[in-house]
Image (tube, rainbow, N blue to C red):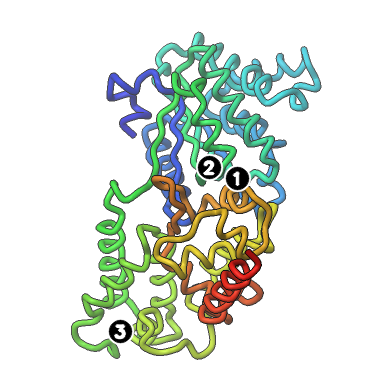
Amino acid sequence: MDWVDGVHADSQDKSLLWLSGAAGAGKTAIGRRICEMSAEKRTLLASFFFSSKDERRNHSGTLFATLVYQLSFHFPTIRQAVSHALDLDPFLFTRSLKTQFLSLVIEPLLAAYRHEPRQQERRLIVIDGLDECADSKSQLKILDAFNNVLTSTPSPICVLLCSRPENEIMNHFSSHKTGKVTLKLFLGDEYGPSEDIKKFLLDSFDDIRKGHILKHLLPNGWPKEEHVDEIVKTSSGQFIYAAITVRYVEDSHYQPHERLKVIVNLQNPIKDSPFAQLDALYTHILSTGRYYKRNPDILAFLIIYRYGPSSGIIEQIIGMEPGEVEVAHSHLGSIVRRHEGRVELLHKSFADFMFNSKRSKALYRNRLETHAWHMLRILQIFSSK
């Protein structure tokens, strides 16, 4: 919000902020909250939340039409400017995204500012889930449109863009061309997510103690501190795990303390899975990319071995061509990251998913059998040499 308001001198000229993080880190929640806070301060211009599962919101075709529609409510004079632009070019919504952004957003807004000089404070546009735009080429076209227009046309617009650190998007923001107008913010451990997650859990469990229909059955001292700490540890800094845990525990049809036992592995779930939503997310991530059929075998190395072997060794063991494992990792930026030359998992809870046949289903790998298979393949490779 300080960036939106232009509080700090060193970020006043940065009109694009890229908020990135792993799947479930809380990017969309933050994007929505920033929208709410900006709307309260009347600095929000418009927002667009991509969704891979919604055919209306998994492509770029309606992006700028949606932004213009929202803009017209804040500045009624924009309607006239947009109508004039469409009269001059009836096919404007089929032009390049850069042309649409410039002709339908920037120029009408600047014209409106000339008529309403009192409203010339910084205004915000929020774009969330860019990585969920189905066409990766469109993702880059959107980024180029924002970067080119914001760099070449001074305006009081700032854009908050939230996405996972997918390969193409990371490459774009690594380019020297984006540095002039871009701030980068990664939701990592340096922001103390574990403390926030613990506070969230404690507040949520307190609400359950006070408001659950079966609260009178809760034992004294529930929940135990070590159980809360275990959930925080398993969350690995990702709010999605904690949020799903709370939703599972607070179900009014069950006793909360019994449900919490399931979470901390004190007993097995009888009917349903406590992590159905998280499992669906993991399944979706593993089912994408060029080498999606090999993703479980590739990721098994990161789970079984503390220090995973190199990509070249993995390729030899599981029979892939040189370079294919690195390409596969590039499609898994939501759950893995490269750090100091190594690839590591972002989610500790992923191992629980992968080695549980009821949760991962077709993606399931048996830990002991996988380990034995690796050893056998190594023996075969050495024998052949």
- Which residue type carries mark 2? Asp
Q: Nearer the viewer, residue 196 or 350?
A: 350
Q: Residue 74 location, x and y as percent?
A: 52, 27
Q: Mark on residue 128?
A: 2
> Image point 48% across, 15% down: which residue?
155
Q: Residue 381 location, x and y as percent?
A: 62, 67
Q: Is residue 114 rendered to the left or right of residue 206? A: right
Q: In this view, does 99 lie above or below 226?
A: above
- Which residue type carries mark 1? Phe
Along the polypeptide, which appears first: circle 3 or circle 1? 1
Identify the residue at the far top of this view: 114
Identify the residue at the far left of this view: 221
Quarter occupied by residue 198: bottom left
Foreground disc of the pair 2, 3 = 2
- Disc 3 to disc 1: CB gap under 8 Å: no
Quarter occupied by residue 216: bottom left
Q: Which of 111 and 15 is in front in this view?
A: 15
- Disc 1 to disc 2: CB gap under 8 Å: yes
Q: Mark on residue 64?
A: none
Quarter of the C terminus within the rendering: bottom right
Q: Give me the C-alpha separation between circle 1 and circle 2.
A: 6 Å
Please tell me whether mark 1 sits on a helix, a strand or a loop.
loop
Q: Is residue 115 above or below residue 64?
A: above
Please tell me whether mark 2 sits on a helix, a strand or a loop.
strand
> Image point 65% across, 67% down: which residue?
384
Q: In this view, does 65 lie above or below 330?
A: above
Foreground disc of the pair 3, 1 = 1
> Image point 55% across, 69% down: which residue?
279
Q: Is residue 217 rendered to the left or right of residue 180? A: left
Residue tagged by mark 1?
50
Residue tagged by mark 3?
215
Q: Is residue 15 rendered to the left or right of residue 219? A: right
